[in-house]
């Protein structure tokens, strides 16, 4: 043992893998960083490389470790923990981590008593934890270890050497013989050489040579070795076209850019990219790049329609991936501002968002604002700005308005104040002005012509909650003026004009004679501007109201508006439309009386096209057409019609009449039979063909309380015009009105008529429609009673569910039970008379019931009862579900007797059979010296057996697995005692061997060779060395040792030393040296590397 003063403390080794691409504020060329020691531990930051935006911490917690550079020492018998932590906040799936010993030995296949691999995931911190634990380290555990981390196309690794030193204190009292420990080194050495040699021989041998190789090298478990060889060959199968395939999925933000990269094994293979099966061509959006063996497709400005499945083909091989486009949230850039105004004012609420064309929602007091054609609210958007417009505000528009976007919400309060009404009173009459202010606790002041009004005996000011009033008992001539109410704390004012009428009044009058138009009718051409001025008179000045029907025309209108001046009133229509035709009423009012007058405005426009034509008769080259008058004649009588025609596929029109056709009938002639003809100028497509025959076999398919379903067969004769669809009509018995059931033609020969009254009797008829018109109808012979017929329920059990339904634990259970019955039956599930578990999902429809268990458990086994009920009719069905699992191990395995080279074993069946019968047992044996287990017999049915042909002088242990329909039990039960096979009269004489000295200093059997490399492509330098004991290999560049440089990877396998230079640049050129050192000496070789750009 080492002296206490010289023994360093155990130190955990921390390896941090950071980003390859520099992030803002980060050092682009990271260097190893040693932090402060924490409790006798030091942290060592190793090489930095990217693992797809993930931060990977590989923590090596080595019990009883001694760290010296890259060589680690451990006391024999100590425990070793390796822990790798992966931060997975931005990872789409779990990264892959592998532990290796030496060059090729995957430690995942060596787990057992002394080696354990564990993994876990913390949902709160989003960290994956991978742990490798070595228990009670032995001398043969020494060697080179490596940890590799993979995620998508990123890779990183870390390696170090481990040596076992000395004996632990716990082994002094182990009670084992000294020669047993001494034999371990020789047995391990023989086993390692045998395993490596035989494994390489089997991988390169033909299948017919496997038995010969097993007999030559003493392999007893050939079957297990061949299974492992078959699995290894499957894993080594690689794509012939692709050196690296696409990832399963990619994600990109909307508007961003994504690169899809594949590596080709043969750069000359033709490559094609596809999107949802459609080939992609090179465009500014899709850019194709070639870099060596890499083929890259760049997708610019990704949108929602780029969210699809992409594939790439190289020859006959294909690889696919999916692209997910993440839509960015729409944020509020400019918030809404509060508005305070009065009644009848225009309100505009403006907001700005971060994206053009974004969908937003306007709300008022938490309820969506209606924006239909008849709504008082109008919504407008331009670019990123959105407006909510209220033209004539009322008190009801007061409230909180908000705009909702995917990235946030903004709101503002709108307050509408009631303006004061201007009044006119007679001299000496009382005067009263009122207004309402919201909220009700707002104070205010009254002003007359800008002067503050103070209350007096004749004038009183009253404030009650939200009402404010100004009362004058007897008005005088001095009370006339402009009155204003100003709320405290608000910039809005309410004003009114008060007129005191003293002189005698002149009643109002409308002077229509000034228009000088016949019958008071004004005619204007559509699209022109109309300004109609009518003189008026009256004292005081009358109040003028223009009306069209019941609608009042305001002076604040956009296109149509009314204006009133001192001596005349004016109606203005900026752009006349046909809807402006009608009678306009003028109402004048003042204190002396009232007068009214009417003016008719007639807007002349081009007429509408005629109604759809009807072909009343069809001949070989002629037809007779009739049509209805236009709905709108343009304000003047129709003079006549022009008819044109053209072939359906032609673009040239031919006029059929040169003189106006004054009738609504026309007979085109000299047309080609069977050719579709289009008629221009207000007429539709016609075809010189006849209608079809009537539909056939009209029958009732189904009847409910409100619906009737009919089905029929197509007409016997359809003709060249084809069949466009069917028209379904029905008539309630006792009436002659036939009602259309379908608004649009249907192509199917089955239709359900809905919305029928209960217990009504109807007749149904079907017409076939084509280009020539409707066929004769097919009518039902008898009336149909609209009342649902009760059909007793019947469960139709599938054949595979009539016997026991067996599933394994963890599998999905999805059972569909079809049934019939009318009306819709009531479905109920029971398990052994009790309600089913909440973990079982039941989905019912009109014709079936589905039982779904996402992850089956043992407790789901049992008998299930399904009942279907329609009124008093019930049908039931029983289902037997059995959820099976692996069995437990056998019980009480013991050795009954040992004689000769035979051993008799006996055991009891397992306590837990996995809910399935035991179908057999598997018996294995192991020599006490090696404790390697070999299978003696499989699928054995009895609970006792005799094992024969055992080797004399060996001591054996036995273990037994139980087996059911699911498989072997997870663990086995072993015998507590061993069976020693002895033979009397024999003595073992151990021959003496003289060990040969194989030690030698390092000698390079293959030197390094001067090499040329291309910039950007990996380069390798190779040499071979022979030495015993194993030498330490050091690589140098220009006489400087290469340590912890992520651009270099060093390998050593069976004496072959390799230095890999990742993507070299011209600066990587120089003289490289490989140096081998052991206790007997050292040797080195040099070469020159030149990198060409």
Image (cartoon, rainbow, N blue to C red):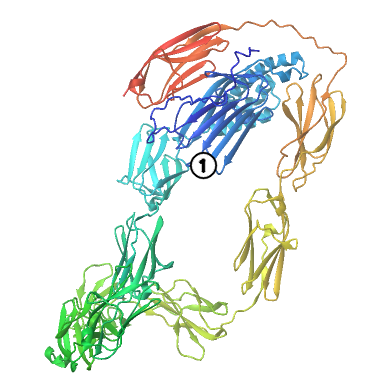
User: As displayed, is residue 725 above or below residue 545?
Assistant: above
Q: Nearer the viewer, residue 455 or 902?
A: 455
Tell me the residue at 52%/32% (across/down): 57
Q: Residue at x 15, y 80 (%)?
A: 531
Left or right relative to 1053: residue 910? right
With 110 as the anchor, is 760 left or right in this view? left
Q: Secondary structure at mark 1?
A: loop
Q: Nearer the viewer, residue 82 or 734?
A: 82
The quarter of the rendered structure image containing the C terminus is: top left
Measured from the top left, where is residue 286 in percent x and y?
33, 45
Q: Quadrant of the N terminus?
A: top right
Q: Position of residue 1005 (x, y in %)?
A: 49, 10
Q: Residues within 10 Å of mark 1 (few under 14, many from 20)?
A: few
Compared with 585, 369 (above or below) is above
Quadrant location of residue 999? top right
Answer left or right for 925 relative to 383: right
Q: Which residue is mark 1?
A: 93
Q: Quadrant of residue 598?
A: bottom left
Q: Position of residue 996 (x, y in %)?
A: 64, 6
């Amino acid at each position: 043992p080492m002296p206490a003063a010289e023994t360093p403390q155990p130190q955990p080794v921390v390896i941090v893998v950071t980003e390859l691409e520099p992030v803002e504020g980060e050092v682009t060329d990271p260097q190893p960083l040693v932090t402060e020691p924490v409790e006798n531990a030091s942290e060592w930051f190793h090489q930095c490389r990217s693992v797809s935006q993930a931060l990977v911490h590989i923590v090596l917690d080595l019990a009883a470790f001694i760290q010296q550079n890259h060589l680690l020492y451990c006391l024999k018998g100590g425990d070793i923990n390796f822990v790798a932590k992966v931060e997975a906040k931005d990872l789409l799936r779990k990264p892959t981590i592998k532990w290796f010993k030496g060059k090729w030995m995957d430690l995942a296949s060596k787990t057992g008593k002394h080696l354990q691999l564990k993994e876990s995931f913390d949902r709160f911190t989003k960290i994956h934890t991978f742990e490798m634990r070595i228990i009670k380290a032995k001398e043969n555990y020494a060697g080179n270890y490596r940890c590799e981390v993979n995620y998508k196309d990123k890779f990183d690794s870390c390696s170090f050497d481990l040596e076992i030193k000395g004996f632990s204190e716990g082994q002094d009292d182990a009670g084992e013989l000294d020669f047993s420990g001494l034999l371990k080194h020789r047995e391990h050495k023989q086993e390692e050489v045998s395993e490596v040699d035989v494994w390489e021989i089997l991988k390169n041998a033909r299948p017919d040579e496997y038995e010969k190789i097993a007999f030559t090298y003493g392999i007893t478990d050939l079957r297990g070795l061949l299974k492992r060889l078959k699995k290894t060959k499957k894993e080594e199968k690689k794509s012939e076209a692709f050196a690296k395939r696409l990832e399963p999925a990619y994600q990109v933000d909307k508007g961003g850019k994504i690169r899809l990269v594949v590596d080709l094994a043969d750069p000359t293979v033709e490559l094609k990219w596809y999107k949802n099966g459609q080939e992609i061509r090179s465009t500014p959006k899709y850019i194709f790049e070639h870099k060596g063996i890499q083929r890259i497709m760049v997708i610019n400005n990704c949108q929602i329609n780029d969210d699809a499945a992409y594939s790439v083909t190289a020859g006959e091989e294909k690889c696919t991936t999916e692209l997910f486009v993440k839509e960015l949230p729409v944020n509020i850039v400019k918030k809404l501002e509060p508005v305070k105004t009065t009644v009848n004012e225009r309100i505009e609420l403006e907001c700005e968002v971060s994206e053009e064309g974004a969908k937003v929602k306007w709300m008022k007091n938490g309820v969506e604002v209606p924006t239909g054609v008849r709504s008082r609210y109008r919504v407008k958007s331009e670019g990123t700005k959105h407006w909510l417009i209220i033209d004539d505000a009322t008190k009801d528009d007061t409230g909180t308005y908000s705009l909702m976007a995917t990235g946030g919400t903004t709101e503002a309060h709108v307050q509408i104040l009631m303006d004061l009404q201007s009044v006119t009173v007679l001299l000496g009459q009382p005067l009263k002005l009122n207004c309402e202010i919201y909220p009700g606790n707002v104070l205010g002041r009254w002003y007359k012509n800008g002067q503050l009004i103070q209350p007096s005996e004749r004038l009183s000011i009253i404030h009650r909650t939200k009402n404010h009033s100004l009362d004058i008992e007897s008005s005088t001539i001095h009370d006339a003026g402009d009155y204003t109410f100003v709320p405290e704390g608000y910039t809005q004012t309410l004003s009114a004009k008060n007129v005191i009428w003293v002189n005698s009044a002149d009643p109002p009058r409308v002077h229509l004679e000034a228009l000088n138009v016949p019958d008071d009718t004004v005619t204007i051409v559509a699209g022109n501007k109309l300004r109609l001025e009518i003189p008026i008179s009256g004292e005081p000045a009358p109040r003028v109201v223009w009306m069209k029907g019941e609608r009042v025309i305001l002076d604040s209108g956009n296109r149509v508006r009314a204006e009133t001046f001192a001596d005349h009133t004016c109606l203005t229509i900026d752009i006349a439309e046909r809807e402006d035709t009608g009678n306009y009423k003028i109402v004048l009012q003042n204190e002396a009386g009232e007068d009214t007058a009417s003016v008719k405005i007639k807007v002349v426009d081009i007429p509408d096209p005629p109604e759809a034509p009807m072909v009343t008769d069809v001949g070989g080259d002629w037809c007779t057409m009739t049509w209805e008058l236009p709905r709108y004649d343009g304000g003047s009588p129709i003079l006549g019609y022009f008819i044109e025609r053209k072939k359906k596929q032609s673009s040239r029109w031919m006029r059929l009449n040169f003189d106006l056709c004054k009738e609504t009938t026309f007979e085109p002639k000299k047309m080609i039979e069977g050719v579709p003809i289009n008629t221009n100028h207000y007429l539709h497509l016609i075809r010189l063909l006849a209608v079809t025959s009537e539909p056939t076999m009209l029958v009732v398919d189904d009847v409910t309380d409100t619906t009737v379903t009919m089905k029929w067969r197509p007409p016997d004769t359809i003709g060249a015009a084809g069949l466009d669809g069917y028209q379904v009509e029905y008539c309630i018995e006792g009436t002659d009105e036939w009602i259309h059931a379908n608004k649009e033609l249907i192509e199917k020969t089955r239709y359900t008529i809905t919305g029928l009254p209960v217990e009504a009797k109807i007749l149904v008829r079907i017409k076939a429609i084509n280009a020539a018109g409707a066929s004769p109808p097919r009518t039902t012979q008898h009336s149909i009673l609209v009342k649902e017929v009760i059909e007793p329920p019947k469960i139709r059990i599938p054949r595979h569910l009539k016997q026991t339904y067996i599933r394994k634990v963890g599998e999905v259970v999805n059972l569909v039970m079809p049934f019939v019955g009318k009306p819709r039956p009531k479905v109920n599930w029971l398990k052994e008379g009790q309600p089913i578990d909440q973990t079982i999902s039941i989905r019912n429809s009109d014709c079936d019931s589905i039982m779904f268990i996402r992850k089956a458990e043992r407790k789901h086994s049992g008998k299930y009862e399904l009942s279907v009920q329609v009124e008093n009719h019930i049908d039931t069905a029983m289902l037997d579900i059995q959820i099976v699992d692996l069995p437990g191990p056998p019980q009480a395995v013991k050795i009954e007797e040992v004689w000769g080279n035979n051993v008799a074993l006996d055991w009891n069946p397992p306590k837990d059979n996995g809910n399935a019968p035991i179908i057999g047992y598997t018996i294995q044996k192991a020599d006490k010296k090696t404790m390697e287990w070999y299978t003696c017999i499989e699928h054995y049915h009895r609970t006792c057996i005799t094992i024969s042909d055992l080797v004399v002088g060996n001591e054996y242990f036995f273990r037994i697995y139980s087996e059911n329909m699911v498989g072997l039990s997870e663990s086995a039960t072993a015998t507590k005692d061993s069976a020693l096979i002895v033979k009397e009269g024999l003595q073992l004489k151990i021959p003496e061997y003289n060990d040969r000295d194989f030690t030698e200093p390092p000698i390079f059997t293959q030197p390094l060779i001067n090499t040329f490399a291309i910039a950007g492509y990996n380069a390798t330098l190779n040499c071979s060395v022979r030495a015993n004991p194993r030498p330490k290999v050091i690589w140098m560049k220009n006489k400087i040792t290469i340590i912890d440089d992520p651009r270099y990877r060093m390998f050593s396998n069976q004496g072959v030393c390799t230095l890999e230079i990742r993507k070299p640049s011209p600066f990587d050129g120089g003289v490289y040296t490989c140096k081998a050192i052991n206790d007997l000496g050292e040797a080195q070789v040099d070469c020159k590397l030149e990198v060409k750009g």
